[in-house]
């Protein structure tokens, strides 16, 4: 009897996981947590400006977050074929089907309009929202299609990462060509490179065997880890460079030095000794968060 039960169990079709609800699918596909960090970059840029106000920064944070969520929704629709090739992203197709592509596009359009309206209201002008739109155009119009064809997609990826902070600076009345603004945004642009590389390293075997360009196809894992470390060190240098390009309070200076002083050894130990690329990835993300906090300290 026991053997018969086992045989019947083997012939039964596997139980399918229940599909996610539309709201959960919407929040996952819009990369809500990541989008909140993008909005935080804009708030940091706003408060980094000497004339920046908390009210303006909060409005810019919410507005840019909504715009980033809209861009992420469109990005996932653009990548739906590519995502089927990797186990870590296959869930997105199910989520797209659960929410409905048309519904997601409508939601993205609504969030984009609301987000831009908030940025306009916070700044009293159109140029900061134009900077937000520029970042989305680079992200969805250049970076997303280019990453399927070339490793050079890292360049537009870094550029679109710089635009939220510049938009926040402009919302406070600054020019995007101001020395302090460009220096602060450059730190984020440099950070984007090791951030993208270590994401590939975390899933190196799967990405390397895929049909799309990947930096893991150019380097062995150990060599790629050293390349990433070099970029992290360059990011650290950019933090020190910013100190000489813009005024910082004592507490902000302390955070910047603490961030730059401890990141590289922690990152190197985690990546090379512990060999935990996921934890190294978390350290890198925390470092950018601390950097944003330093920018917001008056």
Image (cartoon, rainbow, N blue to C red):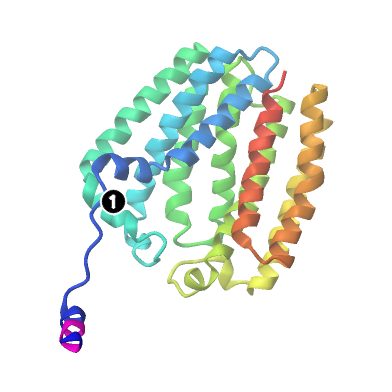
Q: Indicate left or right for 217 with 179 as reference.
A: left
**Residue lying furthest front in this view?**
1
Residue 10's place in the image compared with 189, above or below, is below
Residue that appears at 48% across and 57% down: 147
Q: Is residue 88 visible?
A: yes
Residue annotated with mark 1: 95
Residue 269's place in the image compared with 180, above or below, is below
Secondary structure type for disc 1: helix
Q: Which residues are magenta?
A: 3-7
In terms of depth relative to the viewer, which is nearer, 154 or 105? 105
Q: Indicate left or right for 90 with 233 as reference.
A: left
Residue that appears at 52% across and 31% down: 39
- Looking at the rendering, in which quadrant would you find the N terminus? bottom left
Residue 11: x %, y % from top left:
16, 81
In terms of depth relative to the viewer, which is nearer, 252 or 235? 252
Residue 203: x %, y % from top left:
52, 66
- Looking at the rendering, in which quadrant would you find the C terminus? top right
Q: Indicate left or right for 203 with 268 as reference.
A: left
Residue that appears at 54% across and 13% down: 55
């Amino acid at each position: 009897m026991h053997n018969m039960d086992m045989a019947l169990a083997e012939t039964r079709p596997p139980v399918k996981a229940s599909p996610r609800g539309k709201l959960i699918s919407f929040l996952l596909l819009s990369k809500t947590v990541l989008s909140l960090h993008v909005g935080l970059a804009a708030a940091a840029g706003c408060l980094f400006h000497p004339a920046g106000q908390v009210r303006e920064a909060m409005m810019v944070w919410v507005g840019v977050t909504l715009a980033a969520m809209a861009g992420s929704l469109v990005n996932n629709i653009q990548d739906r074929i590519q995502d089927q090739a990797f186990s870590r992203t296959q869930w997105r197709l199910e989520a797209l089907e659960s929410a409905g592509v048309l519904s997601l596009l409508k939601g993205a359009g609504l969030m984009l309009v609301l987000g831009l309206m908030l940025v306009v209201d916070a700044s009293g002008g159109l140029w900061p929202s134009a900077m937000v739109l520029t970042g989305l155009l680079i992200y969805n119009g250049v970076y997303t299609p280019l990453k399927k064809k070339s490793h050079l997609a890292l360049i537009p990826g870094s550029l679109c990462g710089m635009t939220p902070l510049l938009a926040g600076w402009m919302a406070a009345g600054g020019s995007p060509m101001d020395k302090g603004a460009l220096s602060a945004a450059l730190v984020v642009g440099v950070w984007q490179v090791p951030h993208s590389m270590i994401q590939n390293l975390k899933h190196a075997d799967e990405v390397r065997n895929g049909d799309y360009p990947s930096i893991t196809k150019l380097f062995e894992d150990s060599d790629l880890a050293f390349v990433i470390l070099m970029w992290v060190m360059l990011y650290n240098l950019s933090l020190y460079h910013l100190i000489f390009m813009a005024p910082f309070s004592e507490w902000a200076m302390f955070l910047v030095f603490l961030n730059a002083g401890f990141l590289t050894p922690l990152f190197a130990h985690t990546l090379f000794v512990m060999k935990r690329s996921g934890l190294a990835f978390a350290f890198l993300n925390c470092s950018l968060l601390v950097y944003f906090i330093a920018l917001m300290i008056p």
